[in-house]
Amino acid sequence: NAGVMQNPRHLVRRRGQEARLRCSPMKGHSHVYWYRQLPEEGLKFMVYLQKENIIDESGMPKERFSAEFPKEGPSILRIQQVVRGDSAAYFCASSEGGTGVYEQYFGPGTRLTVT
Amino acid sequence: KNEVEQSPQNLTAQEGEFITINCSYSVGISALHWLQQHPGGGIVSLFMLSSGKKKHGRLIATINIQEKHSSLHITASHPRDSAVYICAVRSGGSRLTFGEGTQLTVNP
């Protein structure tokens, strides 16, 4: 059973370009979470999705960021018109269910560098 | 004040020493996680617990719900244990709230 997959592992974008980060959850998991780790800072929650639904996006910046988890295919975190401050490690986690009894399993992360 | 506080921020130990990392939180929780992150690496979940104590190899995690406190212990520490250890809590939903992490260095 493969773990949580994220790609790309490293992504370099120039200011103003778009970044698309992909997350494939573990088999059988229908809950996906995105977290961001800015340089020298702790992890912060961004968004929680189930298939075709955004459940909690209270941690998403109001502009330029969006997330989806379609019926088929990976979850995608999209950042439009990237700025240097978006440079960070973005981690995805998945779980079998959405309550506290279910463990979240983390992917290897995507390290985004904006030049 | 952060909802999740870890101490110490940095910890240096000699190989073989017993190590304790502490985590205090200020909200009601449904579960607490201990995570490990190597430099430039991914995040590995070590424990998820909501009461009592769990043990895996040389690692032990305890939680006291009444005192809102958890500890992670490493027995017979080894240089390969060098990493950042992160405490995270789940409260009022599915999102995790993280501590700032404890940087552990174990010297041979």
Image: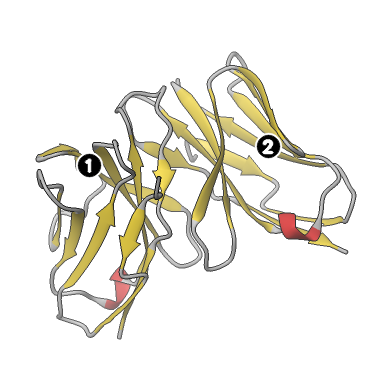
**From the viewer's perspective, is A39 left or right of B93?**
right
Q: Name the amino acid type tagged 2.
A: Asn
Which residue corresponds to the image point at 48% horizontal and 54% vertical from the top-left? A42
Q: Quadrant of residue B59?
A: top right
User: Up-down: is B52 above or below B88?
Assistant: above
Q: Position of residue A14 (x, y in %)?
A: 23, 85
Q: Is residue B27 in view from this perspective?
A: no
Out of B9 and B78, give the one closest to the viewer.
Answer: B78
> Alpha-carbon neighbours of circle 1 within 10 Å: few (<14), some, or many (≥20)?
few
In space, the residues marked 1 and 2 are separated at their CA atoms by 28 Å
> Alpha-carbon neighbours of circle 2 within 10 Å: few (<14), some, or many (≥20)?
some
Q: Position of residue B44 (x, y in %)?
A: 53, 49
Badge number at residue A58: 1
Q: Position of residue A33 (x, y in %)?
A: 30, 44
**Quarter in which the C terminus of chain A is drawn:** bottom left
Count up the numbered dots: 2
Q: Secondary structure at mark 2?
A: strand
Q: Quadrant of residue A19?
A: bottom left
User: Up-down: is A61 above or below A1?
Assistant: below
User: Up-down: is A83 above or below B97?
Assistant: below
Q: Position of residue B55 (x, y in %)?
A: 70, 29
| Residue denoted by label 2 | B22
**From the viewer's perspective, is B7 left or right of B65?**
right
Out of A100 and A41, give the one closest to the viewer.
Answer: A100
Q: Is residue B26 in view from this perspective?
A: yes
Q: Name the amino acid type tagged 1.
A: Ser
